[in-house]
Image (tube, rainbow, N blue to C red):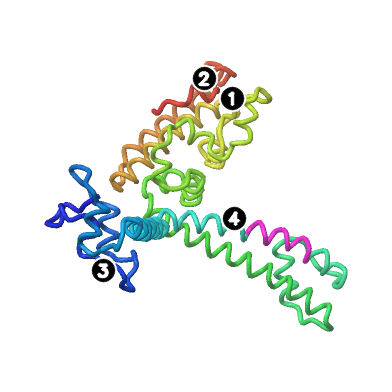
Amino acid sequence: MTDTDDNADAGWFAGGSSAGSEATGDDPALRARIAGGEADAPRDWPGLAVESGFADSRDGYYDRLHEASVAATREAVRERERADDKQLVHAVRAMDDCERTANELAERAAEWAGSLFDDAEPGIEGARAVAEREPEGELERRAVSLAARVADLAAERDALAETIDRIAPAVAPNLAEMAGPELAARLIALAGGLESLAKKPSGTVQVLGAEDALFAHLSGRAPSPKHGIIYTHEYVRNTRPEDRGSASRALAGKLTLAARVDHYSGERRETLHEELRERMATIRARVEEGSGDGGGDGAGDDTVAATEGDE
């Protein structure tokens, strides 16, 4: 592997520290050549490295190549993890963890507080009320402290939700507007990133979050799922059951296009949103026209195979 500049014939190690020095493979220039360098033809790089003094032997060359490759990989991973869509994934997963943990602890706090205080209420709000009490004795202090932790986790969950509401439109403007910031963040998290979501077919986006139901269907134990997490979108949730398959397909198709536009251009496109609104109006008009049965949400129409193509 070589660079494409004046050192193209000298190897990726050109300019690197000599053998026996304290320098390691964590050199910016070496990392850059490892990550983006290229060679027109193979050469005896170990021999050239020994001749240039970069390595004291062929084995030493491979040791330093390993160090430089690991350093370049770490840098690439570090940059990818710091990307905005990855931070959005961390935020939504942390929000879910806070919510789940707060609800679990709230049950324990309510049970404990109920044995100590006659007017203790269940749930997060009950925990917040207990957290404001003045404890008397060691046991009450511990119960009040536990309730305070529940209140803190619930507050952190709300703060994370506000952060997602602010960040998601900047990361994926079309997707966030179409799905809402929280659903957009969840879709990105389920896909593993905005790029991964943009590369998925609409049929896969349609059932993201319904993997258990999908696997049950593929093993012949259940019908094909009509939707996954996109059920929380009002276009699906507020559509009559017999038309939800059509609504899910229409929404998934436009969400897929929105993710692709966000990833590859980042520009807001009003036509995507207009087309989705028109499509949903057509689907919901079936109720008034009395043609809901012709909408086609039977078993054959709702198979995953039928939804794998993009709109």
Height in image: 242 above or below 179? above
Q: Nearer the viewer, mark 4 or mark 3?
A: 3
Mark 4: amino acid: Asp
Residue 105 horizontal/vertical position (percent) = 73, 63
Mark 4 neighbour class, 10 Å CA radius: few under 14, some 14 to 19, many 20 or more: some
Q: Residue furthest left?
A: 6
Q: Is residue 83 visible?
A: no
- Which mark lies nearer to you, 3 or 2? 3
State the residue position of label 4: 96
Mark-to-mark CA distance, 1 and 4: 31 Å
Q: Secondary structure at mark 3?
A: loop
Q: Amino acid at mark 3?
A: Ser
**Residue 114 occupies which quadrant of the picture?**
bottom right
Query: What residue lies at 42% left-to-right and 29% top-to-bottom?
Result: 279
**For the C terminus, which image quadrant?**
top left
In the rendered structure, are the residues bearing label 1 and label 2 in contact, judged by CB atoms less than 8 Å apart?
yes
Which residue has dot 3 on it? 17
Q: Is 101 on the left-hand or right-hand side of 274?
A: right
The part of the chain drawn in magenta is: 99-109
Q: Position of residue 161 (x, y in %)?
A: 52, 59
Of the numbered discs 3 and 2, the one sitting upstream in the chain is 3
| Residue 169 coordinates in the image, percent (x, y) | 39, 53
Q: Nearer the viewer, mark 1 or mark 3?
A: 3
Q: Does label 1 or label 2 sit earlier along the sequence?
A: 1
Q: Say which residue label 1 marks.
A: 242
User: Are the residues flagged by discs 2 and 4 in contact, CB closer than 8 Å?
Assistant: no
Q: Counting residues from the N terminus, which is met first, the one under dot 1 or under dot 3?
A: 3
Question: What is the three-letter code of the residue carrying label 1?
Answer: Glu
Q: What mark, if any, has residue 295 been given in the picture?
A: 2
